[in-house]
């Protein structure tokens, strides 16, 4: 992250040089005249000159300030600090006076005597301890837990020892409530803030450690010294004497900072309005670790608290935050102070949000909640769909969870610059414009995207916001659940959106990633900021959702799963939990006495998934399980076992849900009996389980023959699952590519979306690998192969508006493949449509290409120099974001080297092409042969700029690395990739996605070695 050192006006002379925690050492101004006031409090105690400072610190005025602090603390907390023990007072150093909440009254004469005596003892002990090796331990935070003697304390910003040595914060102090006042200045892109934190003491301690990043702390109360440790973004507030268990205290920090110019923290964003004028705004994105960039806080999900937020703005802006606005006051400066209601729920810091902008809303009441959708004024007409969708889904979730959404309002806001798809801030969900805005003529497929994102973020209001994972290791409890609920709710509320195909495809991709040795367990240890970022991956989201689907499918009836979820939400309402908490809730409601914990732990605590191999002798079917691991050698061999609810159907009954039978495979192998008359078995009915099945040569032959004679003997999900599994087994080396091709021979009779799209995806992966290896002969044979098998289906596709989502998915996949293979019918039609569109727009008519076909049309257009320029012109003037994004994908698919370089640079600069789109641009550029080599150079040259825009480990960086490297298949490329990333050190060499990239290249190389000759023979 880029640290911002803002102007240093108004800071006392004794501020810490080069510190991100620049500070006035104490609110009581002990060192008003001193140029050498020690930053670290213990020096005050132990050095003779400090006693002068101590005496100065006891002035009358200071006492008043102390008293005021105590009073306000008590007011805020609604209580007095009655639990101070006399023992505590006698232990106090004279600094007690500067620790407001605990020492409201002047020390008595007796206390003073005791204090002086105590000081003498301490001073003599210090003389001894100073020369002992353990000396430094005196200077560290102590909590009830004894700190191991070998702990190495880091050096803080000003060269002293930082008193806390761990990534996680100590548990001694818990925040109860925050009072935040923020004054953003959108003219010079800075802000100032005041944060008041009320806390309770859980264990005796002598300091408060919390988070803060890139904040210049200008003033703080309740402290004797303040230290910063930048690498962990921690601040330690040293208190003069121990805070005792059960006490309450208040910390106030004033600070200033720059608005971030990346996509996290309190960041600035801008857009150009319809008059061509640049408009600026400020918004927040705190998940996972960036609340600390906007205000000092205990920035871990388990430190839940309430928040009261005030924002001071210019009159021409509006503000939004998690809660409804309570009042607005015009200040003498002419600025307006908006005060929001205090949050009615306790929440984690990463869910706090605020926005200063000039947005306009549309609103609607849904039971007790006012739902609003906000956008920039000129896009207001694109907000209707989001409002009606959010309203219906809110109603659905209120009923489904039997717990009403707890806030009075729910805002959904489209932000012009936004990196993620959306963010579930409680009561103030923020979105990318393409994830929220839908034009009047939008296609059902575009609506599906928006509805999915809304359904996901709304589910988070329960999973994540109401019940939160205790730590990021269990991120899947948030993301896996929200992903699962997103598909489940859409299937119920909007069946026409046909979300099932998408969910199936997503489960296949999760299997692909989890088959790598570089994958990780769903619930996995997380100890660094990069590891936190890396948790936002397909294992937490898609594998998480997949194992929930599997569990739901093996519980008796939807209602049991639902009951378990309700129980879980009830039990952990407004608090935090972990994976065990969820499984225990589900075990409690299981009527079939299923030990959910036992079963599901095998899926969450170890990485990967099982390969189930079927072998049959007469009526005996033996199922064997092993870890499906693409890279397996002696060092990676695992003896992992899963508790697998294996489902199966056979040729006598294979379609209806009643046909499904279940066999639980917990051990290495198990046997089931079947009537001898059964011709074939299909396991993993409708692919609801998270495993891959190998049927053995005979089993595959029987299934292949069955599909040849009648496609409809299996559900379309089962057909797609066979296709996915056989390609995966070929990659594993368990089936020959010849067997893959035999199965695919049935494809000429296939018309359903999910099997066709899965087959096309798998074939295009191979096609691209061959293309990148410049195996020209094989590339052209592969092209013929694909066209032979899919041409008749391609030719049947129409280019007019299509209502069915499933048909849109099918035709866009087929036509994109056909046009990318230069199939004449396809490219001619696409060119003609583009010409029509251009003519229409220049004659001021409105005509439109169906949403699902825009990408293919723009991609074909971008291959000609003239049309590329036209498309760029259209892109620059387009306002509807979904369409604009497809134009960008078209532009990025050019094979013209000069244009490719331009587009990558433009994405990095962020002027014409927003930097948020760079991962998309890169993945698109990589599809082509010219582009993928450019991208690799581009990434190496611009790495530092990339990680400045996107955090190391983030989903954006994961995408960029994957796009750039996943098509390499040679030793030379492997060496290059390895060499580059290992040279990065702390700038990214430790990322899991780097391991994944290297493993993928090795696998590609192996696949090529093993299959090139087969391909030459069989294609
Ligand atoms: Zn999410």
Image: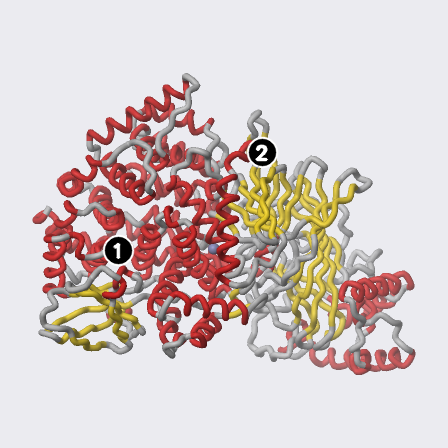
Residue 200 placement, left or right of 411:
right
Reply above or below: 471 against 108. above
**Residue labelled with disc 1:** 717
Q: Position of residue 182 (x, y in %)?
A: 70, 49
Q: Position of residue 635 (x, y in %)?
A: 28, 70
Reply above or below: 143 against 983. below
- The image's mark for residue 217 is none
Instruction: Determine the residue positioned at 90% across, 64% down.
Output: 59
Instruction: Determine the residue positioned at 35% across, 70% down.
Output: 556
- Mark 2 Cα-neighbour bin, 10 Å: few <14, some 14–19, many ≥20: few
Quick check: can you spot residue 632? no
Quick check: can you spot residue 369? yes
Image quadrant in which you'd find residue 692: bottom left
- Mark 1 Cα-neighbour bin, 10 Å: few <14, some 14–19, many ≥20: many
Which residue is most to the left? 1017
Instruction: Determine the residue positioned at 66% across, 61% down.
Output: 306
Q: Nearer the viewer, residue 409 or 757?
A: 409
Residue 124 placement, left or right of 572:
right
User: What colouring method underlies this structural image?
Assistant: secondary structure
- Mark 1 or mark 2, earlier in chain: 2
Image quadrant in which you'd find residue 144: bottom right
**Residue labelled with disc 2:** 377
Reply above or below: 845 against 178. above
Tell me if label 1 and label 2 are in contact, CB under 8 Å. Answer: no
């Amino acid at each position: 992250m880029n640290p911002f050192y803002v102007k240093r006006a108004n800071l006392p002379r004794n501020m810490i040089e080069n510190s991100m925690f620049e500070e006035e050492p104490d609110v009581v101004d002990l060192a008003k005249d001193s140029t050498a006031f020690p930053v670290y409090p213990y020096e005050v105690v132990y050095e003779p000159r400090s006693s002068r400072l101590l005496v100065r610190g006891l002035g009358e005025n200071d006492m008043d300030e102390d008293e005021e602090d105590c009073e306000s603390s008590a007011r805020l907390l609604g209580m007095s600090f009655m639990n101070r023990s006399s023992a505590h007072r006698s232990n106090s150093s004279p600094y007690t006076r500067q620790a407001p909440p605990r020492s409201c009254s002047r020390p008595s004469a007796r206390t003073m005597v005791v204090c002086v005596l105590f000081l003498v003892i301490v001073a003599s002990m210090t003389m001894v301890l100073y020369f002992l090796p353990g000396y430094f331990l005196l200077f560290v935070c102590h909590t009830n837990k004894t700190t191991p003697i070998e702990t190495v304390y880091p050096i803080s910003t000003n060269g002293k020892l930082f008193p806390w040595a761990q990534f996680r914060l100590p548990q001694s102090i818990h925040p109860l409530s925050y009072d935040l006042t923020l004054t953003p200045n959108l003219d010079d892109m800075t802000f100032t803030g005041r944060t008041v934190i009320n806390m309770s003491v859980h264990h005796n301690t002598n300091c408060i450690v919390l988070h803060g990043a890139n904040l210049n702390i200008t003033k703080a109360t309740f402290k004797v010294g303040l230290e910063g440790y930048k690498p962990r973004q921690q601040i330690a507030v040293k208190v003069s004497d121990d805070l005792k268990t059960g006490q309450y205290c208040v910390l106030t920090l004033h600070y200033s900072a720059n608005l971030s110019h990346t996509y996290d923290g309190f960041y600035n964003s801008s857009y150009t309005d319809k008059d061509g004028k640049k408009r600026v705004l400020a918004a927040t994105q705190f998940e996972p670790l960036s609340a600390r960039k906007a205000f000092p806080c205990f920035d871990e999900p388990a430190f839940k608290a309430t928040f009261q937020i005030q924002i001071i703005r210019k009159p021409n802006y509006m503000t939004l935050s998690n809660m409804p606005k309570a009042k607005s006051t015009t200040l003498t400066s002419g600025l307006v102070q908006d005060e929001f209601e205090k949050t009615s729920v306790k929440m984690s810091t990463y869910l706090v949000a605020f926005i200063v902008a000039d947005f306009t809303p549309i609103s609607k009441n849904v039971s007790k909640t006012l739902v609003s959708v906000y956008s920039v004024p000129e896009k207001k007409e694109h907000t209707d769909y989001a409002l009606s969708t959010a309203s219906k889904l809110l109603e659905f979730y209120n009923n489904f969870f039997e717990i009403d959404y707890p806030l009075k309002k729910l805002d959904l806001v489209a932000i012009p610059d936004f990196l993620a798809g959306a963010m579930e801030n409680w009561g103030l969900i923020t979105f990318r414009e393409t994830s929220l805005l839908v034009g009047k003529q939008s296609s059902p497929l575009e609506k599906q995207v928006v509805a999915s994102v809304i359904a996901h973020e709304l589910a988070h209001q329960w999973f994540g916001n109401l019940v939160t994972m205790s730590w990021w290791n269990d991120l899947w409890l948030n993301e896996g659940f929200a992903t699962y609920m997103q598909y489940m709710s859409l299937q119920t509320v909007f069946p026409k959106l046909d979300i099932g195909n998408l969910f199936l495809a997503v489960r296949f991709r999760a299997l692909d990633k989890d088959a790598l040795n570089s994958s990780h367990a769903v619930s996995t240890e997380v100890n660094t900021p990069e590891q936190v970022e890396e948790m936002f991956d397909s294992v937490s989201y898609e594998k998480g959702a997949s194992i929930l689907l599997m569990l739901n499918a093996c519980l008796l009836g939807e209602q049991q799963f639902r009951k378990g979820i309700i129980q879980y939400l009830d039990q952990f309402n407004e608090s935090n939990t972990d994976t065990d908490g969820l499984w225990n809730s589900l075990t409690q409601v299981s009527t079939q006495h299923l030990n959910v914990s036992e079963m599901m732990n095998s899926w969450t605590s170890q990485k990967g998934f099982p390969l189930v191999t079927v072998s049959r002798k007469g009526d005996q079917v033996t199922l064997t399980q092993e870890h499906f691991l693409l890279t397996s050698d002696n060092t990676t061999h695992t003896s992992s076992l899963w508790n697998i609810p294996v489902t199966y159907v056979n040729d006598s009954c294979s379609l209806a849900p009643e046909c499904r039978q279940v066999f639980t495979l917990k051990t290495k192998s198990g046997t089931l009996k079947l009537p001898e008359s059964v011709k074939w078995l299909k396991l993993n009915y409708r692919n609801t389980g998270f495993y891959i099945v190998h049927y053995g040569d005979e089993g595959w032959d029987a299934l292949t023959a069955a599909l040849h004679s009648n496609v409809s003997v299996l559900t379309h999900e089962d057909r797609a699952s066979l296709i996915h599994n056989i390609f995966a087994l070929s990659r594993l080396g368990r089936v020959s590519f010849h067997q893959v091709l035999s199965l695919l021979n049935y494809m000429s009779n296939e018309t359903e979306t999910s099997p066709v799209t899965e087959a096309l995806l798998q074939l295009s992966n191979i096609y691209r690998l061959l293309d990148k290896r410049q195996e020209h002969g094989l590339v052209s044979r592969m092209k013929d192969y694909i066209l032979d098998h899919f041409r008749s289906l391609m030719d049947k596709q129409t280019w007019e508006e299509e209502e069915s989502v499933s048909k849109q998915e099918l035709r866009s996949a087929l036509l994109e493949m056909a046009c990318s293979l230069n199939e004449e019918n396809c490219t001619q039609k696409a060119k003609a449509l583009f010409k029509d569109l251009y003519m229409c727009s220049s004659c001021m008519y409105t005509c439109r290409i169906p949403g699902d076909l825009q990408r293919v049309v723009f991609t074909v257009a971008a291959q000609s120099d003239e049309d590329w320029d036209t498309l760029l012109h259209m892109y620059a003037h387009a306002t509807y974001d979904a369409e604009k994004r497809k134009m960008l994908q078209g532009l990025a698919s050019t094979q013209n080297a000069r244009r490719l370089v331009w587009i990558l640079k433009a994405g990095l600069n962020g002027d014409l092409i927003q930097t948020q789109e760079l991962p998309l641009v890169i993945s698109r550029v990589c599809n082509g042969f010219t582009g993928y080599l450019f991208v690799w150079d581009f990434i190496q040259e611009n790495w530092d700029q990339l990680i400045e825009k996107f955090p190391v480990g983030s989903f954006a960086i994961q995408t960029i690395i994957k796009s750039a490297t996943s098509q390499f298949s040679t030793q030379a490329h492997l060496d290059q990739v390895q060499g580059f990333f290992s040279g990065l050190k702390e700038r990214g060499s430790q990322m899991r996605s780097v391991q994944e990239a290297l493993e993928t290249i090795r696998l590609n190389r192996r696949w090529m070695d093993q299959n090139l000759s087969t391909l030459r023979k069989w294609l």
